[in-house]
Amino acid sequence: MEDQDGREDRDRREGRDGGRPVEGRDHLIVCGLGGLALRLISALHHAGNAVVAVDAAPPAPARQLLEELAVPLVVGPPWLSPVLRRAGAARARGLICAEDDELRTLETALSAQRAFPQLRVVASMSNASVGRALAGVTGPGTVLDVATLAAPSLVQACLADNHNTLRIGDAEFEATSVEVTAGGSLRSLFGDLVPIAVTRAGTSEVEVCPGRDVTVGSGDTVRVLGSPDELASAGVGRPDEQRGDGLGRHRPARQALVLLRSVTAQVEWPLRLTLAALVALTLGATVVLRFGYRQPGPGGHHLSLLSAVYFTVETIATVGYGDFSFAQQPNWLKVVGIAVILVGVTLLTTLFALLTSQLFGRSLAAALGQRRITGMRGHVVVIGTGSVGVRVVEGLLAAGANVVVIERDDNNRHLSRLRALKVPVITGDASQPSTLDAANTTAASAVAILTSSDLTNLDVGLALRDRLGPAADTLPTVMRIFDRSLSDTIAASFGFRSVLSTSALAAPWFIGAALGLEILSTFYVERQLFLVGALTVAPDGGLAGLAMQELSARIRVISIRRVGTTIMEHPPRRATRFAPGDRAWLIGPPEELLAVLRRDAVPAAVAAPPGLVEK
């Protein structure tokens, strides 16, 4: 058992300490200890921010992590103002509501806003309508959706699009990957373009923000950043957008052909047999009537081909309009007519029965593309239709890609949205080979595994690899894993290259919103996450008077606008010194860049980022 000193020490770390509030000022409060909250706490701690955690029932693993980071924990319901007061809400710089239960998140955010009006409250909310209403209370840019923030990077990975467009001030910049064909220094190969990453040939290790004198060889890949004119001058262009096999949404004739092939392939064999027999009967009867039937009266002539087809259909359907009749025909032709009527009625009745059975058994819907996408090529298979999956599907469609969705739950609330987008949905377990075959994964251009369960995503990824065999090595497979450390472990252990952490992509946006900073973009280069942000140099901050070359070697200044001017210097010289009031745009790993942004950013109202719930 713990002795008295041990209990007091633990209470002090957890912020209880006999009910006394947490000491200190200018800290951030994170409510909740789920995956996103722990990621935020870790990122804030490593960026040098003072942080306090609040949770009603902290689990043991989370307690252990907080103890390792020496982060104070206040135990109690965060939606109660006395608990937040113990966490120092009256003196805190901001509060992030990141509980797993969105109803509790809403309650905490509203309670905190009411009890501490001066406190900047940021909330994680995937429900669009609730998010809009909450943003009306807490302010623009304070309600963020992890799915919306992470989806662009997931879409990029699916399309193998190594290109990012960034809006820096009033100018547009582009970051794109280039494979080196002839060795040399980055300066000699790319001039004034900003090198932000180098991936050596045959590896996935990334050199972050290398100097221009770094030498690269043939086969290495360099991600460079510059204006469109600078990229064009250096002979660096944007890669062609991937459009699969040309069966884009802008080619309705080809798409209709694929649909027809899908329907034909999915018709069950009894219906196929009945259709074949009916077609054979129609053709045979048409030939017989074409050459055996003569019009009544003198000089009666044979039927034309069209008339023969018409009379055949009329006979099989037993409608009898009176324009043609077997009454005055030879006996053998009358027998043929009787046979055509009997067999035709039987086949038609059978056809309608089988068709009705398939219709009400949902087999017809499956044939229309909801269970098997036969004939489609170059499509993207999206597995899982949670909030992340739907955002990714919308992004892929906007990029012109064909999409097929696999969803286990046929009552999923997002299916109506997918139907409105006319996306084929296959209902089934994606870890089963039959379901993967139904989605025609062997002909897909990429597979995105995006369910809300990390274990399920890993299970499906391994099942896909087993099903495809060696072909799996060439099929881009994008796997969503919420926690960044787990995503890195899975990528290293199982050899998956595109294992992306949604929490890692979203965390900088939450931190920036809580601190009043301006975050512009997050994206991956291989396994390395990059952050783009902006700051205004504070008069008494750590950047005033500092030369850009004295920044961390892993941070690059993209552009700078001097105080009192509208001219943007790009790229600024490394010896250039920051002056108070200068506006600077930087890129680098999130932890290091957040530390710089936090140190010198001037808190101000910021524009709503892409994660603001707007729909």
Image (cartoon, grey):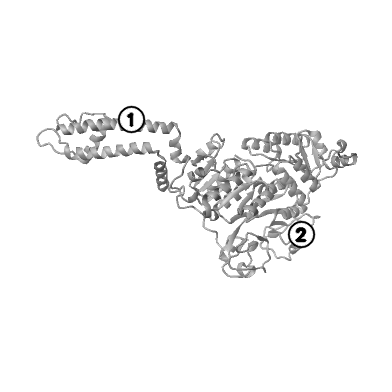
Q: Nearer the viewer, residue 101 or 453?
A: 453
Instruction: Work out which quarter of the rendered image holds the C terminus and state it.
Output: top right
The answer to whether residue 158 is visible is: yes
Q: Which residue is mark 1?
A: 349
Q: Is residue 12 left or right of residue 260?
A: right
Q: Nearer the viewer, residue 477 or 92?
A: 477
Depicted 564 relative to depicted 320: above or below: below
Q: Nearer the viewer, mark 1 or mark 2?
A: 1
List x then y, in percent, for residue 254.
41, 48
Is 242 placed left or right of 16 in the picture?
left
Could you say which quadrant of the image residue 292 lies in?
Answer: top left
Q: Is residue 540 left or right of residue 130?
A: right
**Nearest to N terminus: mark 1 or mark 2:** 1
Query: SS for tag 2?
Result: loop
The amino acid at mark 2 is Ala
* Image position of 218 with respect to 500: above or below: below
**Apparent side of residue 170 relative to residue 89 in the rendered image (left or right):** left
Q: Residue at x 44, y 31 (%)?
A: 360
Query: In the image, what residue occupies the spot 56% across and 65% down?
Result: 235
Residue 115 position within the rendered picture, expressed as x and y whole percent measured from the top left: 78, 34
Q: Quadrant of the N terminus?
A: top right
Secondary structure found at label 1? helix
10 Å neighbourhood of mark 1: few (<14), some, or many (≥20)? few
Which label is found at residue 579?
A: 2
Residue at 39% from the left image edge and 42% from the top image edge: 264
- How would you rate the neighbour count of disc 2 (Cα within 10 Å): few for under 14, some for 14-19, many for 20 or more? some
Q: Are marks 1 and 2 in contact (CB under 8 Å)?
A: no
Q: Amino acid at mark 1?
A: Thr
Q: Is residue 324 visible?
A: no
Residue extending furthest toward the left: 298
